[in-house]
Image: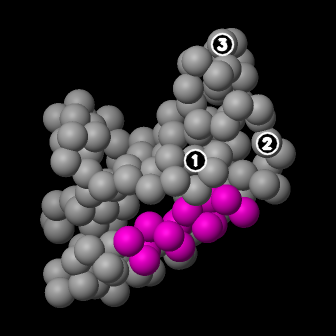
Amino acid sequence: MRHTFRKEERLKSSKVVKQLFSQGKSFLVHPFKANWIIGEEKEKYPARILIGVSRKNFRKAVERNRLKRLIREAYRKNKYLLYQYLEDRHSSCNFSVIYIGKTEEDYSVIEKKIIILLQRLISELESHHPEKI
């Protein structure tokens, strides 16, 4: 699998985002909060992600953009964990990752937490929809 992060893998549809936050399930892996919902099966990519950083905790856009870049990179390198799971079950998932920490973490910490978050997402998907997925 190539480690790329294409435009189509990003969650941009306002309709889907509203549905994600109103009907989706969530969990915490500090410093991240993740919301997820099962997606359409006919998607080209099995997972679509929305990445956010709180303006309340990081007032400057430079700080928020840097954190989003680090999160995107950590996800790009480790998304194969989630992709393998979803492709084996012919399903898809839309999810958001929101950085809720008060201070900026190093890339190594962010990457470890993203791996834990992806593993937790897989277990959440397994426990909520074992027959479909």
The residue shown at (22%, 77%) is 129
Mark 3 secondary-structure assignment: loop
Q: Is residue 46 in view from this perspective?
A: yes
**Residue 121 located within the stretch drawn in magenta:** yes
Mark 1 secondary-structure assignment: strand
Classify the position of the N terminus by image quarter: bottom right
What colouring style does the render use? one colour
Q: Disc 1 designates what residue?
A: 32
Q: Is residue 33 above or below residue 108?
A: above
The kind of residue tagged 3 is Arg
Q: Give 65 or 9, whichever is nearer the viewer.
A: 65
Q: Is residue 56 above or below residue 11?
A: above
- Residue 22 spot, x, y in % from top left: 21, 40
Asked whether disc 1 touches disc 3, contact meaning CB atoms under 8 Å apart, the reply is no
Asked whether disc 2 touches disc 3, contact meaning CB atoms under 8 Å apart, the reply is no
Residue 27: image quadrant is bottom left
Q: How far apart are the two marked residues, 2 and 1, measured between alpha carbons?
A: 11 Å
Badge 2 crowding class, 10 Å Cα cut-off, few under 14, some 14 to 19, many 20 or more, is: few
Mark 2 secondary-structure assignment: loop
Secondary structure predominantly adopted by residues drawn in magenta: helix
The residue shown at (63%, 51%) is 30
Report the magenta residues as a range: 112-124
Q: Give 30 or 43, whichever is nearer the viewer.
A: 30
- Residue 122 spot, x, y in % from top left: 43, 74
Q: Disc 3 designates what residue?
A: 59
Badge 3 crowding class, 10 Å Cα cut-off, few under 14, some 14 to 19, many 20 or more, is: few
- Residue 2 spot, x, y in % from top left: 56, 68
Residue 91: image quadrant is bottom left
Q: Disc 2 designates what residue?
A: 105
